[in-house]
Amino acid sequence: MAARLLAYEVSDLCLGKPALTSLPISASIHHALNALKSSNDTHISIWNCDHNQSDTTNDDQQLIDECRCVGKICMADIICYLCKDDNISFPSTALKSPVSVLMSHVNVPSVVKHVEPSFSLLEAIDLIIIDGAQNLVVPIKNKTSKRKQLRQYPTIAPTTHDGGREYCWVTQEDVIRFLLSSIVLFSPTAAYSIESLGIITAEILTINYHSPASKAADAISSSLADQTSVAVVDDDGVLIGEISPFTLNHCDEMVAAAITTLSAGDLMAYIDCGGPPEDILQVVETRLKERNLDGMLDYLKSILYHDTNSSSSEDELSSSPTSTGPGRYKRSNSYSARIMRRAEAIFCYPSSSLVAVMIQAITHRLSYVWVIEDDCSLVGIVRFSGMLEVFREHLESMIN
């Protein structure tokens, strides 16, 4: 059975996966924002393609080496970008910037890595553990030549690349989920506590519940790059909740205004329950006025207000289940169109078993789980990468 597990390839993890949603690196942040809101994906793949090839018999073969996925962006990237001092005052201008400005935290070649379908499961785990890969880009299907598609859609990168190939990507979650399906092979290791396995990381990002959420802006960016989160704690270090990029990915860009104006505790309420409460929205508006952030205030109104004299069609009304009446805020459609994670933190204990923590993380679609003591004081965090190190050692023992 162990030999069978080691024989698996990354193509086995791609079964049933949809093709990547993609944009060219020359696209604007505004284009990426629209793509994220209209897609079921939380991330958009960014491609750098050189299609300036002569139309010869070998065109497709030449294009294979000229089109690469160079990164990924998500709603949390855009939110963090808008939180910067220069951008919070002029969000409309900031959104006209190219998506490349969002990719500083993913501009390391190993974060997004191209691999062939025949790449082994063991090699994939090594890329994650050793090289820090977060997404493995894998070709999944051959299509017709993309030359025709590029002529039809010259300004938008198609979802097919490299001579018409379609791609999906394999994430750390995919690998963990796959290993969980064969967890019996890792007995008794999988039943050991995470403390005994030494995979609890004490280096964590935190913010006090009463502190301005703006103090967490840089920490949110760091947690996004590390696929973790920012813990919200009280004065005694007790875990209250979190500000998670995974939750922000299901919000809209207006969270940037909330991060700028609210406390960490109020921000948790803002991003919780599928959309911001109206009273908190009013607080955001008032504080934007006080700080003379007129550009963000105008942008806020353009997104969240509707004209008191306008009438909505039945389709528009049905798409906004929380319509609040004339002159009041509407929740963005991006909330109602997605399944929202709450701002409450998912946690375990040092004595929790590895398999139990795996199930927790996968159930909540997270790449980490917080670790607390019995008194709820925060101990650290367990990440997928740490779990994979344990499985890699076990697989190594199988080989030897």
Image (cartoon, grey):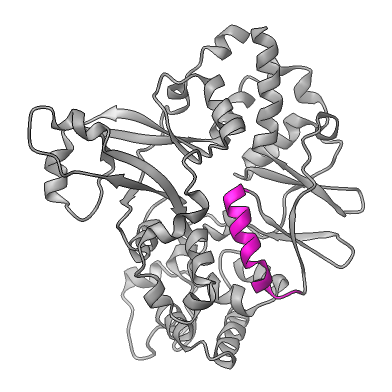
Up/down of 2 relative to 316, above or below? above
Residue 188 % position (x, y): 79, 18
User: Looking at the rendering, which quadrant does residue 266 occupy?
Assistant: bottom right
Q: Main secondary structure of the magenta part?
A: helix
Is 232 part of what is drawn in magenta? Answer: no
Q: How many labels, in total? A: 0
Residue located 47% across and 75% down the image: 87
Magenta span of residues: 211-227
Q: Is residue 272 visible?
A: no
- Which quadrant, please, contains the N terminus? top right
Which residue occupies the foreground of this view, 58 or 40?
Answer: 58
Residue located 47% across and 63% down the image: 78
Name the side, left or right, on which 331 lies relative to 149: right
Name the side, left or right, on which 232 lies relative to 302: right
- Which quadrant, please, contains the C terminus? top right
- Residue extending farthest right: 375
Residue 164 % position (x, y): 22, 34
Up/down of 284 relative to 336, above or below? below
Which residue occupies the foreground of this view, 376 or 88?
Answer: 88
Residue located 54% across and 33% down the image: 174
Residue 313 % position (x, y): 31, 75
Is 218 part of what is drawn in magenta? Answer: yes
User: Looking at the rendering, which quadrant does residue 268 occupy?
Assistant: bottom right
Residue 343 % position (x, y): 67, 60
